[in-house]
Amino acid sequence: MTNRGGIITGWGGYLPAGVVTNHDLAKTMDTTDEWIRNRTGISERRWSDMGPAALGVEAAKIALDMAGCGPQDIDLLVFATCSPEYILPGSSAIVQHSLGLTCGAFDLGAACSGFTYSLVAAHGLLNMGMNRILVIGSEQLSRIIDKTDRNTAILFGDGAGAVVLEACEGEGELLGFDLGVDGSAVNILYTRHDEITHMDGKEVFRRAVRAMVSSANLALERAKLTMDDIDWVIPHQANRRISEAAVSRLNWPMERTSATVETNGNTSAASIPLALVAELDAGHIKAGDHVLMCGFGAGMTWASAVLRWGGVTREGGHGAAAYAAELPS
Ligand code: UT7
């Protein structure tokens, strides 16, 4: 890592109205609440009429407000989604205009790994001189699934999470990362233009656990840390059984692992930022804590990041300027 890093100074999550419970689904397809909860850990998800741009705008407003940023203060918007409104332009253009930003903006498509990919890319751009970057993960997956198909409808939901990343002198919060893709696995999870999502769930499950564990270990190694140094794990919220299988292979307890999948379902690029927001707001992550994010998605992509939390809380706390001087030794 270089000597100009980043620190997250604002965050926000947005879950739309439109809760769909397992019981609701059981009325329209051959499934049960018990089966879904046992096999996935999911009890409900949101299906919304709002597109990813509108969802992302709501999450971003909260994050910008918390960071004390006006539209002119943001140097770049990175928008992670796999359910964009259009083939062109990117949803980021809609968000840029809605928020009144004056900066550049681009979509980043790495499926469920998209937020972590974006966070890492944003750190690189801070290092090249940008000062504040808005990173959003947002999805309207309900639009790209067959809502009567029990193979996919039970899993996927809508939502958005956002962070403001601010440059600071020194290492910053990101200590190590791993980004990967195995393009030979495109056919196990894909959505063609104007079609619904196709998924070989069993194969995704099998590869997901392997990918998350090896990617998490690589990110830890690059951060020069081990699981003994970690305080909180945020896996991609796809299926509670996938999280359990992955963290048990990392010798890590579920008690210190995010499990927002129960109420959010799988929100793809929004799942990690929504879980991060939930843990921060619950006070589970404190100054100096090491946080491991690890995920996987269509591609098949995977992405992990190790952060050392800088101590910003919703009530205030250390800003980016203070961060470098206050790094825990
Ligand atoms: O972000 C990445 C996105 N994708 C994922 O992460 C998906 C990863 N995969 C999974 O989460 C799981 O594979 C699923 C939840 C999709 C399926 O769970 P599973 O434990 O792998 O179930 P299965 O496909 O092996 O099916 C077991 C049984 C089958 O019946 P038989 O053949 O044993 O009689 C299925 O037909 O369960 C049946 N089944 C269902 N029953 C009730 C499959 N889906 C359902 C359902 N409700 N929704």
Image (spheres, grey):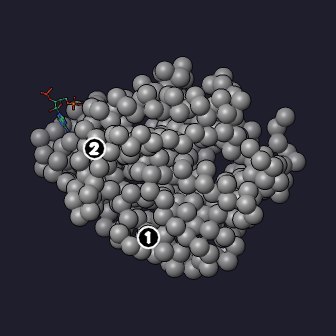
Secondary element at image label 1: loop
As shown in the figure, which amino acid type bears the numbered disc 1?
Gly
Q: Which one is earlier in the sequence, the residue at label 2 or at label 1?
A: 1
Q: Residue at x 12, y 49 (%)?
A: 28
Q: Position of residue 120 (x, y in %)?
A: 61, 50
The residue at which mark 2 appears reads as: 187
Q: Residue at x 67, y 54 (%)?
A: 124
Q: Position of residue 168 (x, y in %)?
A: 79, 55
As shown in the figure, which amino acid type bears the numbered disc 2?
Asn
Q: Is residue 1 left or right of residue 184?
A: right
The residue at which mark 1 appears reads as: 90
Give 317 or 299, whichever is nearer the viewer: 299
Secondary element at image label 2: helix
Q: Is residue 134 left or right of residue 29?
A: right
Work out whether residue 62 can be spotted: no
The quarter of the picture where residue 238 lies is top left
Q: Is residue 6 above or below residue 52?
A: above
Work out whether residue 32 can be spotted: yes
Q: Quadrant of ligand 1?
A: top left
Kindly identify which numbered label has been placed on residue 218. Answer: none
Quadrant of the rendering where the N terminus is positioned: top right
Q: Residue at x 68, y 44 (%)?
A: 174
Q: Is residue 309 left or right of residue 87?
A: right
Query: Can you name the residue that lies furthest to the right here?
Result: 325
